[in-house]
Image: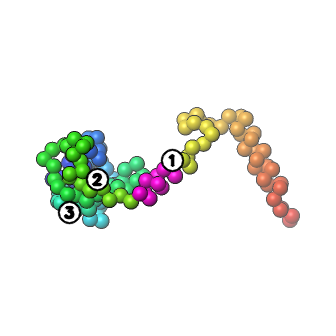
Amino acid sequence: MRIDKYLWAIRYYKTRNIATEACKKGHVKVNGSIVKPSREVYPTDTLVVRKNQIDFQLTVLDIPASRVGAKLVDIYRKDTTPPEAFAHAEMVRLSQDYYRQKGEGRPTKKDRRAIDDYLDDDFFNSDHDE
């Protein structure tokens, strides 16, 4: 079975087109090498799928005949993704939480003045005796 069809069948991608694009962009590796969407996948192959800034590591157990239900996915693949990958993704997500909501745009005049005051205070309080 083609790698793009396999990833669609085991529900890693919502459509085959999205799976194909991921392969073309180099987000999918089979046995350590980047592959084209037409690459055949076989049992015991190891896959690395980069999705949402997480490198999912999978082992192919069997090839499904067609797209399978979510409860049956574990029959066809074994997920060997280390927990550190998920912890790292969570830390990245938390580090991006600012006091302003995403999409609020440029800083307000009040924000700009606060930034300027902070930078001015920081410059004059440090040792600049030249």
Figure check: 126 above or below 9: below
Mark 2 vs 1: CB contact within 8 A: no
Residue 17 drawn at (x, y percent): 26, 43
Residue located 26% across and 56% down the image: 78
Residue at which label 2 appears: 23
Mark 3, Cα crowd under 10 Å, few <14 / some 14-19 / many 20+, is some
Residue 102 drawn at (x, y percent): 55, 37
Residue at which label 3 appears: 44
Q: Of the residues shown, which amino acid type is indicated by label 2?
A: Cys
Q: Secondary structure at mark 1?
A: helix
The span shown in magenta is 83-91
Q: Of the residues shown, which amino acid type is indicated by label 3?
A: Thr
Principal secondary structure, stretch drawn in magenta: helix
Q: Quadrant of the C terminus?
A: bottom right
Select label 2 or label 1 by which is in front: 1
Q: Is residue 55 visible?
A: yes
Residue at which label 1 appears: 93
Mark 1, Cα crowd under 10 Å, few <14 / some 14-19 / many 20+, is few
Q: Please tell me which of labels 2 and 1 falls first in the chain.
A: 2
Q: CA distance from mark 3 to mark 2?
A: 19 Å
Residue located 43% across and 53% down the image: 86
Residue 30 in which image quadrant: bottom left
Residue 126: within the magenta? no
Q: Of the residues shown, which amino acid type is indicated by label 1?
A: Arg
Q: Which mark is residue 77?
A: none
